[in-house]
Image (tube, rainbow, N blue to C red):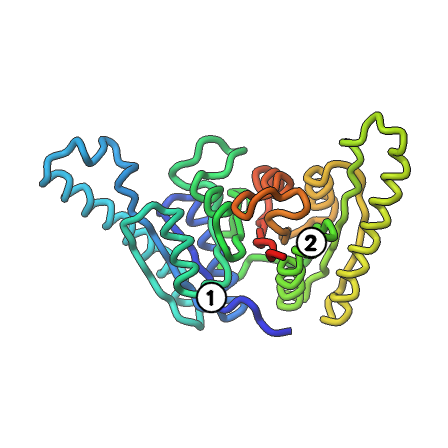
Amino acid sequence: MSQPIRSILVPTDGSEGAEIGARRGVDLAASIGADLHVLSAVDIRETEPPLSNLSADDKLEQEQLLEEQAERAVDTVVRLARSHISGRITTTVEQRTPVRAITDYADTHDIDLIVMGTHGRSDLEQVLLGSVAEKTLRTSSVPVVTVPPSADIEEVGEAVYDDILLPTDGSEGSEAAVELALAWADVYDATLHTLYSVDTSRFAGVDERSQIHDALEETGREALETVRERARESGVSVAGNIGNGPAARVIRSYSEEHDIDMVVMGTHGRSGVKRYLIGSVTETVVRTADIPICCVPMEEL
């Protein structure tokens, strides 16, 4: 299978959460020989006190301090990467809002994958995504790997991807997620687990609930068989399973029971509303995950 990940973008603000994401990003780039791009954005709107309240000289001094801070954050990732990366390492510090800097950079430089920690300097609570990570997921046109604090690795080369989970809803737009999951499993010689959730909770009280369950289960079997066929063609070991219950809960339970190392899933499927909104299932999985989640924008039909 051709390698679809040739360039990886690691955003950083120098926080512990960002460094956790950076270690995963460097590890992946080292494993597959991808080029590494390291970006830090200086957001002058987030200063305290606001720059608008400062004199011209103090404002200039504060901006310089912020840029130096961003440069140190980038240098920290570069020092980590130098002895491991065989591809090019490109660094950038921009004075822009972080989300716009990340998404525009990814589009401009043909980035294939963004890897970032879920908890940066703007975090509120452990159960919530950092606002930058969340907004990046909502607007990115390329896959984004979110790395929670619990998925930290101490050294590059320690990341393990023996078991990868691909949830599917059978939608035609999920092709990109299937392709990336298969490529990842191929690179790491991993077992690909594919999972379909039969959720009839929204049909509570409906007389035909059992028939609906059977119809959904049949759709699930067809969806799993499609992935199995693709996996066999690619020489990837695959296990297909049907779960019962709300999809996010089924995905989390399956991940825990089968020691899943990475989940690869579309950012929205049949329940998606607009291009720039991640589906509720994906959002719930990412918010509660203790392993990396690779969110793949669904192909527009």
Q: What residue occupies the far front of the structure in this picture?
A: 301
Q: Is residue 155 visible?
A: no
The residue that disc 1 covers is 7
The residue that disc 2 covers is 166
Q: What residue occupies the far top of the structure in this picture?
A: 205
Q: Position of residue 41 (x, y in %)?
A: 32, 49
Residues 104 and 294: in front is 104
Q: Quadrant of residue 56?
A: top left
Q: Residues within 10 Å of mark 2 (few under 14, many from 20)?
A: many
Q: Quadrant of residue 194?
A: bottom right
Q: Position of residue 58 (x, y in %)?
A: 12, 38
The residue under the point 79% across, 66% down is 229
| Residue 243: numbered disc | none
Q: Position of residue 89 (x, y in %)?
A: 38, 67
The residue under the point 86% across, 39% down is 212
Amino acid beneath label 1: Ser
142 left or right, relative to 102: right
Q: Identify whether 3 is placed above or below 292.
A: below
37 left or right, relative to 57: right
Residues 147 and 99: in front is 99
For marks 2 and 1, the one nearer the N-term is 1
Q: Secondary structure at mark 1?
A: strand
Q: Secondary structure at mark 2?
A: strand
31 left or right, relative to 38: right
